[in-house]
Amino acid sequence: MGIRENIIVFKEQLPSKVKVVAVSKTKSPEEILEAYHTGHRIFGENRVQELVQKAEILPPDIEWHMVGHLQTNKVKYIVPFVSLIHSVDSMKLLTTINKEAEKNGRIQDCLLQIHIAMEETKFGLSEQELKDILNSPQFAEQKNIRICGLMGMATFTDDEKVIRNEFKYLAKVFHQTKSHYFIQHNYFSVLSMGMSGDYSIAIEEGSTMIRIGTIIFGEREGPNRQS
Ligand SMILES: *Cc1c(COP(=O)(O)O)cnc(C)c1O
């Protein structure tokens, strides 16, 4: 099967409330267009330079999502056009995004990334760090940021129990955060969890947005799981 069939068949079997981010990192513009021509519009990348280069040459109605770790010095390249940043993991990054969004006259939609995996290498905030950000006066002043939900990456393991527990924990933090901080804000509605290897567990645990590369585009060359 090719990309076209992969994405059509994959999306058909999903619950309608779950959105798919087609993660196209390392894939060519031609491969992305094959998915685009099925009507799919949400694509994700994990590197700023690749994201910017692809956005320049691909159709302007693509909704680009930044799913990988983001450095403050690169924020300015993506804020002019990116639809959603999944990987916000510090107050410093939020402050920079807010400043750039203000310059561009935009409100930047973001997710806060929570550390849920056992692996030390994964990025993300602890529950306490999340609360510290949401309680800070500095956050309250950031008028050009809209926090739309949370994102997390489970441990890379075959142990379904471990993965399920991590997603359960993220879903719990998501619901608590919604009821404490965003109860009157319907935009806080995105729970981004699940990749090619663990999306069905993620959906069972309440995911509303899955980030899918391999199932749509096939295996990537080289080590590129980590973002
Ligand atoms: C690469 C990547 C994905 C997609 O991975 P697959 O296993 O190929 O579906 C999802 N999220 C992030 C943050 C990624 O870097």
Image (spheres, rainbow, N blue to C red):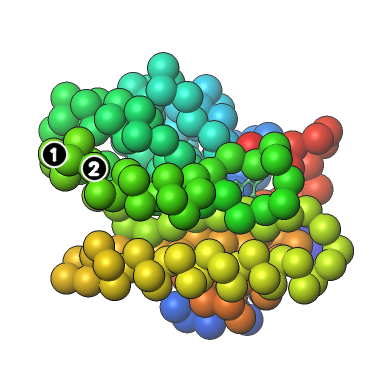
Q: Amino acid at mark 1?
A: Glu
Q: Looking at the image, is 57 positioned above or below residue 4? A: above
Q: Is residue 5 visible?
A: no
Q: Residues within 10 Å of mark 1 (few under 14, many from 20)?
A: few
Give the image quarter of residue 204: bottom right
Q: Quadrant of the C terminus?
A: top right
* Residue for point 16% across, 30% down: 102
Left or right, residue 105 beside residue 190: left
Compared to 4, does 142 lie above or below? above
Structural distance between the alpha carbons of marks 2 and 1 = 9 Å
- Per the image, the residue denoted by label 1 is 141
Q: Nearer the viewer, mark 2 or mark 1?
A: 2
Q: Residue at x 56, y 68 (%)?
A: 169
* Labels 2 & 1 near each other (Cβ < 8 A): no
How far across and down, in percent of the image, does residue 184 sit? Answer: 16, 71
Instruction: Where is residue 180? Give x, y as percent.
Output: 27, 67
What number is the disc on residue 136?
Answer: 2
Q: Quadrant of residue 90?
A: top left
Please tell me which of labels 2 and 1 falls first in the chain. Answer: 2
